[in-house]
Image (cartoon, rainbow, N blue to C red):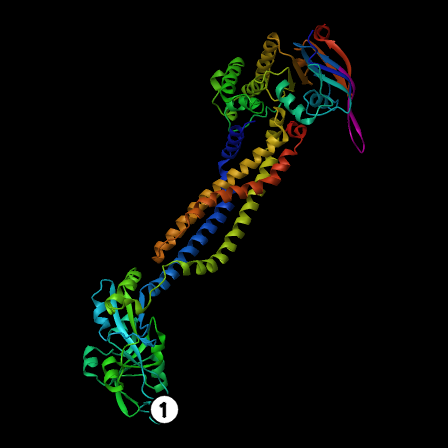
Amino acid sequence: MTPPVVEMTGVGRVFPGPPAVEAVRDVDLTIQAGEYVSIVGPSGSGKSTLLHLLGLLDRPTHGVYRLDGVDVSTMRERRRTRLRGERIGFVFQAFHLLPHRSVLENVELSMIYLRVPRRERTARARATLERVGLGHRVDFDPLLLSGGERQRVAIARALVARPSLLLADEPTGNLDTGNAASVLALFDELHADGLTLAVITHDDGVSARAERRVRIVDGTVRHAVDAQEVRR
Amino acid sequence: MTVPDLLGEALAGVAARPSRLALTTLGTVLGIAALVATLGLGQTAAGQINDQFDRIAAVRVVIESGETDGPDGEVALTQLPWDAPERLGRLAGVEAAGTFASVDVAGAPVRGVPYGTIEQTVPVAGASPGLFDALGARLAGGRFFDGGHEQRADPVVVLGRYAAERLGISRVDSQPSIFIGDRSFTVIGILDAVDYRSEVQDSVIIPMGTARALYGLEAPEAVEIRTALGAAQLIGEQAPIAVDPNEPDLLDVTAPPPPGSLRDTVSADVNGLFLALGGLSLLVGGLGIANVTLLSVLERISEIGLRRAVGAGGLHVAGQFLVESGIVGFLGGLIGSTIGVLATVGVSVVRDWTPLLDIRLALAAPLLGGLIGLVAGTYPAWRASAVEPITALRTA
C-alpha cells in the first residue's frame, strides 16, 4: 500500500520570541494520495504557517512530517529544496508570474531547477498549458491575460513538474466569481484525474468543493469533517 | 540548473527591464569609456610626441674620422675628403649633407666691432654650405654662405645664436664686422635654431674654403647627413663606402637606432595619470551597479520566493543575480569600450593625429566591465540568496 502523501504527527511551530509565538501546535494531519482537502480557518489561525510547513518552506519545531512516507522534518535544507521542487506544486493568491516572460517560459520555470532537458521542458509545458485550456496563449505576456487565465498559468506551472501534492493558497482570492468558478472547475477535473490537492482558504464556497474539510483554529486542527456532512 | 539555463534566466532578467538596464550600465559605460579614451588618447598623444622625436632623430647620420693603426704601430687618424658632401649627394635618400670642423685659430681673440675692446674666447668652426641644411638650421636674420663664398675663401661668417649675443650683434642688415685676431670678417647671417649639433650656436662659423686658406685646416672632422624619413639605417651603411671606398670600415658612423625604444618610457608617464582617472570612474560605475542590483533584489523579492518554491536553492538565486550584474557590467564595458575607441579616433581626426590604441585594451575592456559587474553583484547576490521564501511569497 502506498504511504499517504502527507502524514503530520504532533507537528508544532514556535516562532522564537520574545514573546515566543506558538503559531501551530499538535497538528495531526493525513492526506491520502488522490484526496482533495481544503484547510479552512479565520485569519491568524495558523493557516499560513501550516501551508508553509506543508510546502517545505518552513520546518516544524516539534513533531514529525512525512511526505510520501519520507521524514522531511529533519532533512537537510538542500534536499528539502530539491524535494520542494519535485513533489510540491504551489498556487498562490497573487499568481507570482514573471512579467515580461512568456506564458510558456513561466511554466517552464518549474522544470529548470530540476534539470529537465530543454526540449522536454518545452513539450511538457505546452502539453500542460493545453491541459488547463491555455494552448492558444503560450506566447503571451502574462500581463496581458485576465486574472483567471493568469491563475491557470500558475496552475500549469505547478502541475508541469508532476508534483505529489498541489498546494493552493487562497487560489480564488484575487478572482471575480466567474474566473473563480472556472479555476475551481479545473481543480475538480484535476482531482478526477487523480491529483492530490490541498486548498487553503477562508472562503466556504471554495472549501465546499473539496472532499474533506480541515478546520484550523488557534493553531490547531479542531475537527476534520467531510464535505457532505457540512452540506447537510 | 545547467549553465545555459543560468545564463538564459539571467539574460531574460536583464532584458526584462531595458530602461533600468540603460541606467545601470551608465556608470560602467562612462567608466570604461573614460578608461579606454584616456588610455587611447594617452597612447595617441605619446605616439605624436614620439613621432616628433623620431622624425628628428630618425633622419640623422653622422660620419666621423676614425683611428687607424699605422704600419709601424702608430695610431693615425683617417681623413675625411673635402668633397664628401658631393659624394653623398649622389645617394638616394640623402636630403642634405655638409662637413664640419673645429678651426684652430691659434688663440686669436674674437671681437665684435662696436665693442671692439672686449675680447671674447669664442670657438671658430668651419662648415660647408650644405651643413646648415643638414643640421636643419633656421636663421634669425641674414643668409647662409654658399658655394661661391667657399670657393673664393671669402671672409664671411655666420654667427651661432649665443655667439652673436656674446659679440653684441643682433642685426645683419648694417653688415657688421667681427675680428678674429687681426682679420676682419663680415657677418652675413645669425642662426636662430638648429636640430642637431647645438654647439654651433656658440660658434663663429666660417666657410670651409676660408678655414683651409687662412688657418690651414687639413680635413673635415665630421660629415652631417640628413636623410629622407626611414632611410637613415640604409644611408648609415652606404655612406662610408661613398665617402671612402678604399677603407670604409675605418670611419665612425652614427645612425639612429631602430624606432620604438624611446616610445615606451614617455607613454608610461602619460598613462599613469590617465589610468588613475579611468580607475576612479570605474569605481563609481561599479558602485552604481551594486546599488541598482541591490534595489532590483528588493524589488524582485516575490520572484526570488517563487524560484525558491519551484526548487531553486539559495546558490541558484545568488548565481542568477551575480550573472545578471556580470552581464550588465559586460554590456557597459562593451558600449564604453566602443565609445572610448570612437572618442580616441574622433579627437585624433580633429587634432590631425594618428590614432594609436592597443587592440588588447579594446578587447579587454568589456571583460573588465564584466568583472566589475561580478564584484559589484556579490553583495546583492548574497542578499538575494538570504531572502526567506516565506516572506517573499506573502501575499502582496
Chief SS of the magenta region:
strand
Task: State the residue in front, B380 or A200.
Answer: B380
Q: Is residue B244 visible?
A: yes
The C terminus of chain B, quarter of image: top right
Q: In screen coordinates, is B11 left or right of B93?
A: right
Task: State the residue in front, A62 or B394.
Answer: A62
Provide the secondary structure element on which disc 1 rests: loop
Q: In screen coordinates, is A62 left or right of B13?
A: right
Farthest residue, direction right: A19
Report the label total. Answer: 1
Say what amino acid the circle numbered 1 marks: Glu
Query: Which residues fall within the magenta stretch?
Result: A12-28
Measured as percent of width and height from the top left, residue A125 is found at 52, 18
Measured as percent of width and height from the top left, residue B101 is found at 30, 78
Tell which subunit mark 1 falls on: B
* Residue named by callout 1: B119
Measured as percent of width and height from the top left, residue A106 is found at 54, 24
Instruction: Give above or below for B98 relative to B48.
Output: below
Q: Can residue B20 be seen in this view?
A: no
Q: In which quarter of the image is residue A71?
A: top right
